[in-house]
Amino acid sequence: MKSTPSYAAAHGASLADPSAFWVEQARQLAWFQPPPEPVLSQEEGTGFTRWFRGGQLNTAYLCLDYHVAHGRADQLALIYDSPVTATVRQYTYRALLDLTARFAGGLRNLGVHKGDRVLIYMPNMPEAVVAMLACARLGAVHSVVFGGFAPQELAMRIDDAQPRAIICASGGLEFNKVIPYKPLVDTAIAQATHQPAHVVVLQREDVVQAELQPHRDVDFREVLQAAPVPAVPVEATDPLYILYTSGTTGKPKGVVRDTGGHAVALKYSMGAVYGLQPGETMFSASDIGWAVGHSYIVYGPLLQGCTSVLFEGKPVRTPDAGTFWRLLAEYKVQVMFTAPTAIRAIKKEDPEGQLASQYDLSHLRYLFLAGERCDPATYEWAGHVLGVPVVDHWWQTESGWPMLATSVGLSDVPPPCAGSAGQPVPGYHVQILDEGGQPVPANTTGLVAVKLPLPPGCLPTLWQDDARFQRSYLDTFPGYYLSGDGGYQDAHGYFFIMGRVDDVINVAGHRLSTGQMEELLAAHPAVAECVVLGIACPLRGQRPVGLVVLKDGQTISEAQVEQELVGLIREKIGAVASFRQAAVVKRLPKTRSGKILRKTMRQLADGEDFTVPSTIDDPLILAEIRAVLQRRQVGHAFESLAGNLAP
Ligand code: COA
Ligand code: AMP
C-alpha cells in the first residue's frame, strides 16, 4: 500500500514543480484524452494560467458513469433529507446516472448543446443536482443562482450569461414560509434583455404550483422522459460552470470554473484536505447556490465515489437545533462541513449541546467550517459538543476549494488551532503582503495574497471579462492573486484571516457587496449621501446597516425612510442581504480629500478601539455619528444584544 505523503512534502513538491505535482494528481481521473505535459501553460495574449490544455474529459462521466462501471452502481450517491417537506429520498450511482442521462437528453431536445449556458434557480433538491450534472454531461455551462436573490439579481445574471434555458423549481420553503420561485423567474425574464428559449419548471405540488407559459415553459418531468444521452468529451479548459459572486460594485463577478482543473483539484482535495475515501459519506450543510455547495455537495463527493447528504432545511427550527446531529447519526457521516453562523444558531438554541448527546456521532471524524471567520468561542463549543477536531479552513468562490486548511488526509500535518484557518493547502503559496506588495514579518497584519500560478480549480478568468479579472485580482501586485482579505501569519506558520479589506461583507456566510447596497440607497429620492457598514452580529457574523444623509428640505420621517430603504434592498438584492436597519445622520465623516471613514464608523459601532485619522475633515462629525448610533442602538457598542439575535 502507498504511504500517505507528509503535509510538508506534498506542499513543498506542489510549489517546487507545480506541473509535475498536478500531473500526478490528474492520473487519478479517467480522461478521454490525457493532457500532454507540461500541464501548466499560459494563455496567449492574456498570460493567464491554464491547466491541462489538450486534455479531454467529462465531469458528469467521472462523477457517475465511471463509478457505475467500477463497482459502485448500487452504492448511494446522494441522500436527500428535507425536514421542511418531510421527504427523504436516496439515489444510487446507477439511479443518479439514469436520471442525469435522461435529463441531459431532454435538454438536448430543447436545443441545449455544448457551450450553451443554462441558469439554475432551485432550492437544495436532487433535481437541482441532476440539472447541474446533466449540463456537465452535455458540455453546457451551468450557472446556479442562490434562491435568496431577488429578480433584479437574476436578471443581471441572465443578461451576463445569456442562458439558452432556465431550470427552476416552482418554489421553496424557508422555515415553513413558501417562496414561489417561478414568479421571480418570470419577473427577472421580463426585466432582462436576453430572453431564454425555455424555462424548465419542476412542479413541487406539496409546496406551490407554478403557472406555465405556453411554448416557452416546459415541465421538468416531461424533459426527464427523454432517451438517455452519453457524456460529451470537452476540453479541459472549457468552462464547466459560471458562479456569480459579489464584487465591490453592483455588477456581480461571473467566476468561471474550467473542467479539467476543477475535476483534478476537487478529487485531490477530497482525499488530501478532508481525508475522505471512496465509499465514505460527506454532509455539507450549505446551499447548491454557493461555491461550497457546488464543490462539496455535488462535485467533490461524486468525483471521489462518496455518498453526499443533501439537506433542505436550516440548522435550527427544522424542526430543532438537533437536526444536523440527526443527519450525522442516521447517515453515518464521516465528515461534515458548514459555516460558523450555523453553529452559532444551534448554540443559541441549545447552549449546552444536549441535543447532540441524543445521537450516535461515533462515525464523525471532523467538522470543517468556512465561509467566514470562525470565532474561537464557536470553535471550542463545536469541538466540545461533537467530540471531534474542528477544522476552520479558508476559501473563496474564486478558488473553488480550500486555500488554507488543516489537510487531514496528509500525514504529519500541524493540528488545527482556534482562530486560525490553518496552513496553505498543497498548490497554494499564500503570503501576507504590505501595501507595497512586500512580504511582512510574522504576526504582522497585511493583505492575503497567493503567489502565481494558482493551482488547478481556481478561476481562470471572469465570464467574458478578462480585463476585470486582471484588474480585480492581478494588477495590484504583479505575480500575485489578491484575495481581498486581510490577516497575518504567526511564527508557527498558522494563518489568521481577519476579514475583508474591501467593500465586501459576510452575512451568515453569504458574501455581499456594501458598495452595491450603497448604490441602491443613493438612488432613493430623499437620500443625498449614504454609507453601508458591515457591523458585527452575534448570529450572522456581520450584518449591513445604512447611515444616510437626507437631501436638504426633506420632510420624510426617519422611520419612513428606513422602511423604504429596507424594502428597496429586499426588492433589488433579496431577503438574503438581511438589511434591516438604516439611520439618518446629518453628515458623514470624511478625510480632507473626501474619503468616507467607513472603517472608523464600523469600529465605533462595534465598540473597537480606534484612532481618529489625522486627516479627518471635522472630528465633531464622529461625535454626531456616535450619538445617532447610541440613539438607534446600532452596533455592539450600543445595542441591547437580545434584539438582534433572533434569526
Ligand atoms: N431562498 C429564499 N430565501 C432565502 C433563502 C433561500 N434559499 N435563504 C435565505 N433566505 C431568506 C430567509 O428566509 C430570510 O428572509 P426573511 O428576512 O424574510 O426572514 C433572509 O433570506 C435572511 O436569511 P438568513 O440570513 O439565512 O436568515 P435565517 O433567519 O433564514 O437563518 C441561519 C439564519 C443562521 C440559520 C442561516 O443563515 C444559516 O443556516 N446559515 C448557514 C449559512 C450557510 O450555510 N452558508 C453557506 C456558506 S458555507
Ligand atoms: P465566498 O466567495 O462567498 O466563499 O466568500 C469568500 C470570503 O469569505 C473570503 O474572502 C473571506 O472573507 C470569507 N471566508 C471564507 N472562509 C473563511 C475563513 N475560514 N476564515 C475567515 N474568512 C473566511
Image: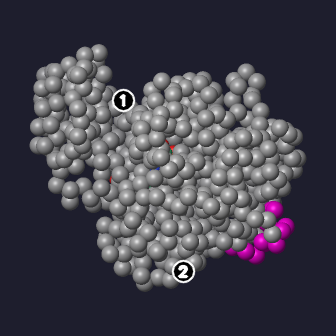
Q: Residue at x 35, y 44 (%)?
A: 570
- Residue 419 place in picture, x, y as percent: 41, 54
Q: Mark yes or no: residue 550 visible.
A: no
- 186 sits left or right of 89 in the view: left
| Magenta-drawn stretch, dominant element (helix, strand or loop) | helix
| Residue at image coords 24%, 26% | 613
Mark sitting earlier along the chain (2/1): 2
Query: Residue drawn at (77%, 37%), measured in percent from left and top?
Result: 40
**Which region is colored magenta?**
65-77
Task: Judge left or right: residue 159 versus residue 508.
Answer: right
User: Circle 1 sits on which residue?
Assistant: 519
**Quadrant holding the C terminus:** bottom left
Q: Which residue is mark 2?
A: 362
Q: Image quarter for residue 124?
A: bottom right
Residue 264 at what x, y percent from top left?
73, 50
Element class at badge 1: helix
Q: Is residue 630 magenta?
A: no
**Mark 2: amino acid:** Ser
